[in-house]
Amino acid sequence: MATTKQPENLRYAETHEWVRVEGDEAIIGISDYAQDELGDVVYLDLPWDAAGNREVKATEHFGDIESVKATSELFTPVSGTVVRVNEALKDAPERVNSDPYGEGWLLAIRLADPSELDRLMDAAAYTAFLASSGH
């Protein structure tokens, strides 16, 4: 297993998305582990025009990420309304590889139910999950 980073201030889903809470918003991206497994990201299919008008539910498919190796589905770890999509990724999807927890974020949603965060793993639990599942 490659050594990957799992910042302590994030929550993680078993599908390898992360959540960072900022006020009433959840910023969502994919983990360092996920981007490492995918390899070079070449394209993202995100809800580009959804800001302000699309409701998403926890575990719902919201987009796809394509790399030189494979195409994978993206799932939202929490429910809410899409407020922003990272437009910079249209022209620079490789930011997901170079900075998965910073400039490589995917979308921001206004949290509908903050208690859903309790179902997600903290960094230690996610690291243990990766180790126990052979990752």
Image: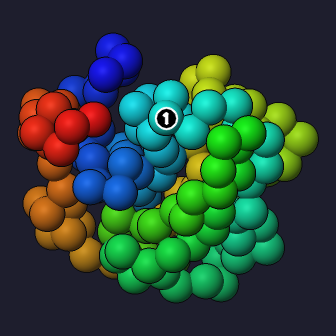
Where 131 falls versus 20 (above or below)?
above
- The residue that appears at 28% across and 55% down in the rendered structure is 13
**Residue at x-position 22% and y-position 27%:** 8
**Residue 11, above or below 8:** below
Whether residue 9 can be seen here:
no
Q: Residue furthest right?
A: 91
Q: Residue furthest top?
A: 3
| Helix, strand or loop under label 1 | helix
Q: Is residue 94 left or right of residue 111?
A: right
Left or right relative to 32: residue 47: right
Q: Position of residue 126 (x, y in %)?
A: 19, 39
Q: Is residue 120 visible?
A: yes
Instruction: Give percent across and percent down for residue 19.
Output: 36, 49
| Of the pair 105 and 30, the residue shown nearer to us | 30
Image quarter where the C terminus lies is top left
Horizontal side of residue 56 vs 2, given as left or right: right
Identify the residue at image location x=25%, y=45%. 11
Q: Is residue 76 above or below residue 54?
A: above
Residue type at the position of mark 1: Glu
Snapshot quadrant of residue 78: bottom left
Q: Which residue is mark 1?
A: 37
Q: How dense is the environment of label 1, judged by Cα within 10 Å: few (below 14), some, or many (20 and up)? A: some
Q: Position of residue 30 (x, y in %)?
A: 47, 44
